[in-house]
Amino acid sequence: MRIGLMDPIIASRPAADSFTRANYLNAVANRVDSFWVPDHLNALFPRALWRPEITAAARVVPSADAYLEPWTVLGHLAARNRIAKLRLGVGVTDTGRRNPAVTAQAAATLQLLTKGRAILGIGCGEREGNEPYGVEWTRPVARFEEAMATIRALWDSNGELVNRDSRFFPLRNAVFDLPPYKGEWPQIWIAAHGPRMLRAAGQYADGFFPAFAHTPQEYARRLEVVRTAASDAGRDPMSIVPAMWVMTVTGRTRDDVDEALESVVVRAGGLNFSDDFYALHGAAHPLGAGFSGAQDILPQGWDTETALSYAKRVPVDVLRSGMLSGTPKEIVEQAAEWRDCGVCYLVLADVTLLQRSLRKGLAGLALSHKVVRGLKRL
């Protein structure tokens, strides 16, 4: 099992990158395989709940919406850290508000500057990063498919003029003359979930990288769809890395873990799970039947009362199933089931600090090395 760690890259104290810097050094110390950052303009989380009396994290991170720009952060990390050559990934960038030519340039630049350590995580995005900023949020999967074809066309152009018809991203005498590093472009890891996205992953991806909550058995089914699509496209299906992004909550005891899961802010994270996932547990989504979860949530306008009412209706059993949660030993045991269903690369987003108690949140974070060591032995 290979392991990556995800940092939220939210501006912290005393310096904007203090928390990110600490997490990067933790990743180095734990000898993980990669370090990841998200691409958001604001949080998939109700900002009304980001208060010190509700979550410990608010004491060190003043705003849950103060996201740093991912490519800038990764370039800064690469320049500042000359030892421990971790792979650096964006998990994941957006084909809605980012033009694919700009994304191709950013990823290729990082690949050159890091001497081949860049991973381009990419997906169709979420409503929260598009609609509030005037970016059209219609046909996101069709836009994604065209974006991927555009990136590949530019990377494969050898500096020649590129002309390509596209509803979304037409190219007219476009030039892309950045070279690949030693003949290798960044790996592309696709956050695919639905049928068309899974087929696109088979056609374009070097890594299958879903994030939203589902079951290990569903992962195995989707991986098979990806591999079939890869084979149909004339690609080696076994060359695609079976990866997964997952939130973790840990503690010294089961009681500590249960207390963290019961906290309002951690439960609010469960609003990003789909109604279909709730239905698997005999529960209804607090935002209503048919709600798709993270892709469509727009929580910025909720007041505190509304946000609390939604968060408190998230069943803890749904949270347990949608995360890796428990003592380090229990998390390793849970991860083994995902391994048995095909996952060989886990990217961990530790949300233990979101609980109310700062002391217990920090104690849980301190256990991360035990979690990583256990997972790497799988």
Image: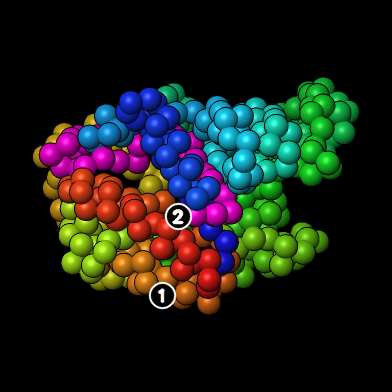
Q: Quadrant of residue 116?
A: top right
The magenta stretch spans residue 39:
yes
- The residue range painted magenta reads 30-57
- Identify the disc placed on residue 165: none
- Whether residue 58 sits left or right of residue 292 in the image: it is left
Numbered disc 1: secondary structure: helix
Q: Which residue is mark 2?
A: 348
Label 2's element? strand
Q: Earlier in the sequence, mark 2 or mark 1?
A: 1
Please tell me which residue is depicted at 33% across the width and 52% down the height of the picture: 365
Could you tell me residue 137's position as x and y percent? 46, 35
- Residue 281 figure quarter: bottom left
Q: Position of residue 209 (x, y in %)?
A: 55, 55
Neighbor class of circle 2 (other Cα within 10 Å; few <14, some 14-19, many 20+) is many
Question: Quick check: can you spot residue 182?
Answer: yes
Mark 1 neighbour density, 10 Å: few (under 14) some (14–19) many (20 or more): some
At label 1, the amino acid type is Glu
Which quadrant of the figure contains the N terminus?
Answer: bottom right
Residue at 84%, 42% in the rendered image: 183
- The alpha-carbon separation of the residues under discs 2 and 1 comes to 15 Å
Figure coloring: rainbow
In this view, 231 is above or below 245: below
Residue 72 image point, x, y percent: 55, 27
| Quadrant of res 313 | bottom left
- Residue 37: image x %, image y %? 49, 40
Which residue matches tag 1? Answer: 333
Above or below, 13 against 275 in this view is above
